[in-house]
Image (cartoon, helix red, strand yellow):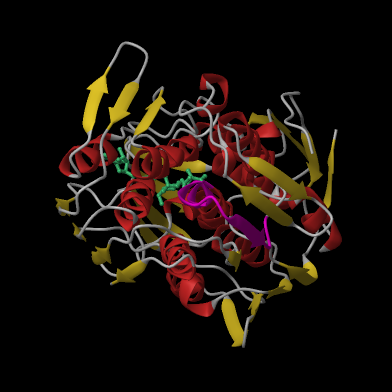
Amino acid sequence: MAITTATERIRTIGGRVLRGRVAIGGAKNAALPAMAAALLTEEECVLENVPLLEDVVVMTELLRALGAEVDLDTERHRVRIRAADIESFEPPPELVARMRASFLVTGPLLARFGRARSIPPGGCQLGSRPVDVDLRGFRKFGAQVEVTESGFELRSGRLRGCEIYMDYPSHTGTENLLMAACLAQGTTTILNAAAEPEIVNLGQILQDMGARINGLGTSRIVVQGVDRLRGYRASVLPDRLEAGTLAIAAAITHGEVILDHVREADMAPLTHKLREAGAEVWWSESSMLVRAPGPLYATEIQALPFPGFPTDLQAAFAVLMTQAQGRSRIFERVFNDRLRYTSELQRMGARIELIDRQQAIIEGPVKLQGTAVRALDIRSGACLVLAGLVAEGETIVLEAHHLRRGYEDLVGKLAALGADIHYA
Ligand code: EPU
C-alpha cells in the first residue's frame, strides 16, 4: 500500500435501496495510537484487525523513519512493530503534516528516551486543533517544553508522576499523556480525561504491555508508572464510525443492512438517534441490523465527547436530516468549524440554515439533486457520498482521496450493498 495523493472522484447514481450484510473493520482512531504505543518498548508488538487506510500507512512510514522495524501485512490486516533501535526523535515534518495522530509519538518518545521534537500536527481542518493539553501535561511530568519557530522541542529525565487536569477532554491528548504516564516514576492521575472507546482500547493494550492503569472509560484515569513495558499482541476494536456511516446509509435509503463485528455499547449514541428518527435497530451479539421501512422524522443532535453523539458522524447524520420530515437541528460542540460541508449539501438542494459556525437547522424532506461537490475532509467526504445515494441523478464527489485516509473501501462496501457507486 502506498500513500496516494492523486485527486480522486467518486460517482454515484442515487435511488438504490441498500440491502445485505457487511463486515466492519478495525478503527482508524484506535489503530494509530496502538501503533504509536509500540515505541514504549524494545519488544515486538503485533496488532491485528488493522484497517488498510492511508493514515495507517503514514504511521507505518513515520515509525520507520524513527528507526522502528515495521511490517504491514495487508493480506492479514496485521502490523508488526519492533522499536528496538530508535535513532531519531523527530518524525518527518511532511508526515506529521498529514495527520493529527502523528503527534501521538511524542508522549512515548519523551517517556522512553527523554526527548522528542515535532512540528504542530496537521490533519482535517475542523477549526482550532491545538495540542496545548499535551504540552501542559508534559510540563507537569517535569519535561522542558520549548515552543520554537518550527514546532516543539521536548526534553526530560525520567518523567515524574503527577496530577494532570485537562482543560478539555482531548481525545489524542488523553492518549498521549496516558502513554507517557505508563513509564513515569510514581502515580499519575489524569482528571477530565476523555472516555472514547478508542482510548479504552489503547489502555487495554498498554495493560497487556504491563502498564498499571485504573479508570479507563471514565474521566479519572490513574496510572502507576512501571520501569519497562513488554511487547503486545492485540486487536483493534471495530470502527464505530465506519459502522455508523453504513448504518446511516441503510436508513436514508430505506434499506435493510446487517453490520457484523460491531460493539453495541460503542454504537449507543447513534442507535438512540436513529431510533428517534424512525429507523429500527436490532442487535444480535456483535451484529447490528438497521432498517427504515417507514418515514424518517426530524431530530436534534449535539456532537459531544463520548458518550455524546460522535462529531465524526455529525455530517453523515445531516444527510439523514435532509430526508426527515420536519425541522432538525445540529449543535456541533466539539469543533468550532465543522459545518463547512453544509454549503456542499446546499448545492445539492438541501435546505440548511447555518445559525453560526456550530449550529445548523435542516428542513426536510427534500429530494437532493446530483451535482459535483467537494469533499473537505474524511467525514465530510463520507457525508457527500451518502447524499449521493439518495440524490436524483449523478453525484460526483471531488477530492475524494480524503476518504481513503479514514475508510477502508467505503465505495466497495456500499456497492456490495447495492449502491450504484464507483471511483472515476
Ligand atoms: N482542544 C483544545 N485543546 C487541546 C486539544 C483539543 O481545546 O489541547 C479542543 C479542540 O480545539 C477541539 C476539541 O478539543 O475543539 C476536540 O479535540 P480533540 O483533541 O479531542 O480531538 P483530536 O484528538 O484532535 C480525535 C480524532 C478525531 C475526532 C476527535 C473527537 C484521532 C486521530 N482523531 O481528534 O477524528 O473527531 O478526536 O472525537 O483520534 C476523524 O477520524 O475523522 C477525526 C477527525
Q: Which residues are magenta?
A: 36-50
Q: Position of residue 345 (x, y in %)?
A: 56, 38
In what quadrant of the picture does the C terminus appear?
Answer: top right
Q: Is residue 46 magenta?
A: yes
Q: Position of residue 183 (x, y in %)?
A: 33, 54
Q: Nearer the viewer, residue 141 or 254?
A: 141
Badge count:
0
In what quadrant of the picture does the N terminus appear?
Answer: top right
Q: Is residue 25 left or right of residue 194?
A: right
Q: Residue furthest top?
A: 149
Q: Answer whether residue 92 is visible to the viewer in this image.
A: yes
Q: Nearer the viewer, residue 170 or 386?
A: 170
Q: Answer whether residue 364 is visible to the viewer in this image.
A: no
Q: Quadrant of residue 10?
A: top right
Q: Is residue 419 left or right of residue 232?
A: right
Looking at the image, residue 222 lies above or below residue 351: below
Q: Residue furthest bottom?
A: 284
Image region (quadrant) for ligand 1: top left
Q: Is residue 71 magenta?
A: no
Q: Residue at x 76, y 29 (%)?
A: 8
Q: Is residue 256 left or right of residue 362?
A: right
Looking at the image, residue 265 lies above or below residue 58: below
Q: Quadrant of residue 132?
A: top left
Looking at the image, residue 127 lies above or below residue 321: above
Q: Is residue 36 left or right of residue 132?
A: right
Q: Position of residue 401 (x, y in %)?
A: 70, 32
Q: Position of residue 254 (x, y in %)?
A: 69, 68
Q: Residue at x 77, y 65 (%)?
A: 18
